[in-house]
Amino acid sequence: MTPLVSILIPAYNSEKWIADTIRSAVAQTWQPKEIIVVDDGSTDKTLEVARQFESESVRVVRQENQGAAAARNKAFSLSKGDYIQWLDADDLLAPDKIARQMQVAERLKNPRTLLSSSFGQFIYRPSHARFIPTALWNDLTPAEFLRRKLGQKLFMQTSVWLVSRELSEAAGPWDTNMISDDDGEYFCRVLLASNGVRFVPESKMYYRSVGTTSLSFAVGSDRKLDALWGSMRLHIGYLRSLEDSDAVRAACLTYLQNYAIDFYPRRLDIFEQMGRLAKELGGNLELPQLSWKYAWMRPILGWGGARRAQLFLPTIRWSLVRRWDKMIFGVEKRRLAGNLGV
């Protein structure tokens, strides 16, 4: 029988985007498929919008607010698919995204192979998404994928993956205590249970950039910083469980150094723990350096003030870019409506 694919969408206060996200799931050319939306106690109209799409293949359920990981676990518990497509509530899938990956899956006939795709980032206009290849856009062993991810500060967005149920069950549930980088930690476990990643470049998804409002932006929250440090320790442990070579240790050291600035000087307790781990890896953790754009502020504002400027000023630029893109998006929509006589 043709494998069933479950498209699982956790949603919280996503009324602006959820309709487009569900439409992109419904538009998938792969059949058979099921779509499960779990509203995680939204306080806006997310549930109301999502329920407009209910059908034999689209199921919408609600739970009390417990966080994205709990919503994903709920969606998985309700699913029946042979393969799982995770889809964040503000992202989009190309119509043939799943079909192209399933063509590879059916050819390989190995449920332990993890399938990835290319992804492009956009704000309001998916037609202007930027697809920028990285060293992770390749067929890779689990160890090499994690070594490149840590050593080069790279990521693959949640919705690129197509995961067999066998692999999903082997990885275990999402960690509901991981309020920051829960997707990074989860897919580490998926990788460890897999026999490697098969990259399908023709398969595409569209990742909406939301800037510092993203759930993954941890710098301003002690709870998120604790969770991020927990995820980082797990990442390093996962990679070293696969391989503990000099190259792996060097990648782990680079990983610690790259993220040190997120903790210093706000969380010196974590920074000291990072230093001890660096010594265990055979190196040393240096004091983080400000980029040249902000280093000149240090004599005037001090290190902490210059760091706050480094965090704050890009948010102003991002806000301006976002407003511009939203304005152009509105103009394009009105022009299209006028051309259609709506």
Image: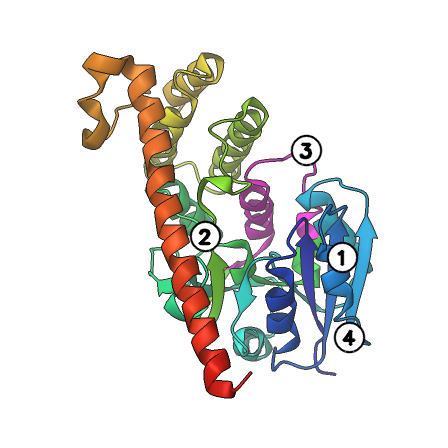
SS assignment at label 1: helix
Is residue 310 visible in this depiction of the protein? yes
Q: Type of residue at label 2?
A: Ser
Is residue 250 visible in this depiction of the protein? no
Q: Nearer the viewer, mark 3 or mark 1?
A: 1
Which quarter of the image is occupied by the N terminus?
bottom right
Q: x, y percentage for residue 248?
A: 37, 38
1 or 4: mark nearer the eye: 1
Residue sitting at the far bottom = 340
Residue of label 1: 47
**Which residue is at a point 77% across and 46% down the rendered structure image?**
41
Q: Amino acid at mark 1?
A: Leu
**Residue pointed to by mark 2:** 209
Point out the frontmost of discs 2 and 3: 2
Which range is magenta? 170-196
- CB atoms at circles 2 and 1 under 8 Å apart? no
> How far separated are the C-alphas under marks 4 and 3?
31 Å
Pair 4/3: label in front: 4
| Label whose residue precedes the other's in the sequence (3 or 1) | 1
Q: Position of residue 144 (x, y in %)?
A: 40, 50
Q: Is residue 40 left or right of residue 314?
A: right
